[in-house]
Image (cartoon, rainbow, N blue to C red):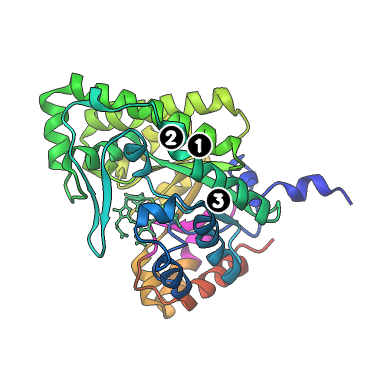
């Protein structure tokens, strides 16, 4: 038997353009608070960031969903906000509320001096994770996209319309551009280091792409991500890159063409007709079950999963959610979805 092809994770094969049957499946935020074993483990660290920077805890949290479920890929347990933290901006998490940052107005205050040392525990966790999982299970690294990171760095917290970053970018595009440039550099270095530590593929989360107008989307989402993709490809030409411009709507096609990503993660508002068009252009599509349907369960969930699988199984496809799993999700609904995906995308 030839061991080589089967050792390449199914996720990587799909991202390289293969139609893989059954389709690979993983979920954004597959580790986390909806799992009782995560809530138990989380108690052992005094803060969320300390948890992220403890390689042993991060590896364990990443492995929890891999033990429970037949996922084909694991995403390293960390957060997009480790980048501003590593650049010297103060970041903390308020229990039950979310992230807080000391808002910045002057990007020249950010520093790369401590960057790699600060993030070393993330890379150590990736090495531990790669060693703990069989070769056919993919390990994913990730980062936040410059625009999405900037929304948190400027507002000092999460928001719904990203008004602080939008007005900042509109009033002073030069200073905003300087911040984006720093984040392109930080994200590129972080992704390359994660690949060197064992990541088989990486995902770039532009969770707030939805807040940008046409010009802003091109300048602050597509162009910076294109630079990150080029930088990562120069260092690691064979490692696939997934982009997630959440809420990009009719802009998904421009995003794929403009960034050159290998895979595009689709939010749940994207129709199967639009997803098939993207797939035909050669990109691997990932998605896009509504996390609310996963939380609700029942026959509506089964039908929604089948609908996605039937539309996308004949081309490069990775089953995922349209956004992260919600903490109110009953863990057994995840088992059910994976079963249906494997059935509906069987060879
Ligand atoms: O399993 C995985 O997907 C890996 C871990 C992961 C986390 N955050 C862990 C986490 C990943 C990939 C992220 C990405 C992330 N973080 C994004 C992009 C994806 C998205 O959701 O749009 C964003 C915007 C963040 C920033 C962030 N981190 C917010 C807004 C919050 C608070 C909201 C919440 O769900 O609590 C976090 C905290 C966070 N990141 C938690 C986890 C498991 C919860 C905190 C805890 O467990 O104490």
Give the residue pinned by disc 3: 317
Ligand number 1: quarter of image = bottom left
Q: Which mark is residue 256?
A: 2
Query: Viewed as shown, does residue 311 lie left or right of 182?
Result: right
**Image location of residue 240, percent across then percent down:** 57, 37
Q: Position of residue 200 (x, y in %)?
A: 61, 43
Q: Secondary structure at mark 3?
A: strand
Q: Is residue 319 magenta?
A: yes
Whether 39 is drawn above or below 198: the answer is: below
Say left or right for 298 vs 247: right
Regarding residue 42, the answer to whether it shows in the image is yes
User: Which residue is the site of mark 1?
Assistant: 281
222 or 62, nearer to the observer: 62
First reached walking from the N terminus: tag 2 or tag 3 = 2
Q: Are marks 1 and 2 in contact (CB under 8 Å)?
A: yes
Beta carbon at label 1 within 8 Å of ligand 1: no
Of residue 39 and residue 320, the one placed in the foreground of this image is 39
Cβ at disc 2 under 8 Å from ligand 1: no
Query: Where, by quadrant of the figure, is residue 226 drawn?
Result: top left
Q: Is mark 3 within 8 Å of ligand 1?
A: no
Magenta segment, which residues? 306-325
Q: Residue 204 placed where, x, y %?
A: 42, 40
């Amino acid at each position: 038997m030839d061991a080589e092809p089967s050792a390449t994770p199914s996720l990587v094969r799909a991202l390289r353009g293969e139609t893989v049957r059954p389709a690979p499946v993983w979920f954004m935020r597959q580790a986390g608070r909806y799992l009782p074993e995560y809530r138990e483990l989380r108690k052992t660290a005094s803060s969320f960031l300390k948890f992220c920077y403890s390689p042993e805890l991060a590896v364990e949290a990443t492995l929890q969903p891999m033990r429970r479920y037949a996922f084909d890929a694991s995403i390293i347990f960390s957060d997009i906000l480790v980048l501003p933290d590593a650049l010297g901006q103060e970041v903390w998490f308020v229990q039950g509320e979310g992230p807080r940052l000391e808002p910045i107005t002057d990007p020249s205050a950010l520093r790369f001096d401590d960057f790699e040392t600060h993030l070393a525990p993330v890379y150590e966790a990736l090495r531990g994770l790669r060693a703990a999982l069989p070769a056919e299970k993919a390990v994913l690294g990730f980062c936040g996209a410059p625009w999405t990171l900037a929304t948190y760095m400027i507002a000092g917290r999460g928001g719904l319309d990203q008004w602080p970053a939008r007005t900042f970018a509109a009033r002073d595009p030069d200073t905003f551009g300087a911040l984006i440039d720093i984040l392109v550099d930080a994200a590129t270095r972080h992704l390359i280091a994660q690949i060197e530590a064992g990541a088989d593929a990486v995902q770039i989360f532009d969770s707030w792409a939805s807040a940008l107008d046409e010009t802003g989307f091109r300048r602050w989402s597509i162009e910076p991500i294109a630079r990150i993709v080029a930088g990562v490809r120069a260092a690691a030409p064979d490692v696939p890159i997934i982009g997630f411009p959440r809420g990009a709507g009719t802009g998904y096609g421009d995003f794929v063409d403009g960034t050159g990503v290998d895979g595009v993660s689709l939010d749940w508002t994207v129709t199967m007709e639009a997803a098939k068009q993207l797939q035909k252009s050669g990109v691997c599509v990932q998605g896009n079950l509504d996390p609310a349907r996963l939380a609700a369960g029942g026959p509506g969930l089964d039908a929604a999963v089948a609908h996605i699988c039937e539309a996308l199984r004949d081309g490069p496809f990775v089953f995922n959610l349209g956004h992260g799993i919600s903490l109110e999700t009953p863990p057994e609904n995840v088992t059910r979805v994976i079963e249906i995906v494997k059935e509906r995308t069987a060879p």
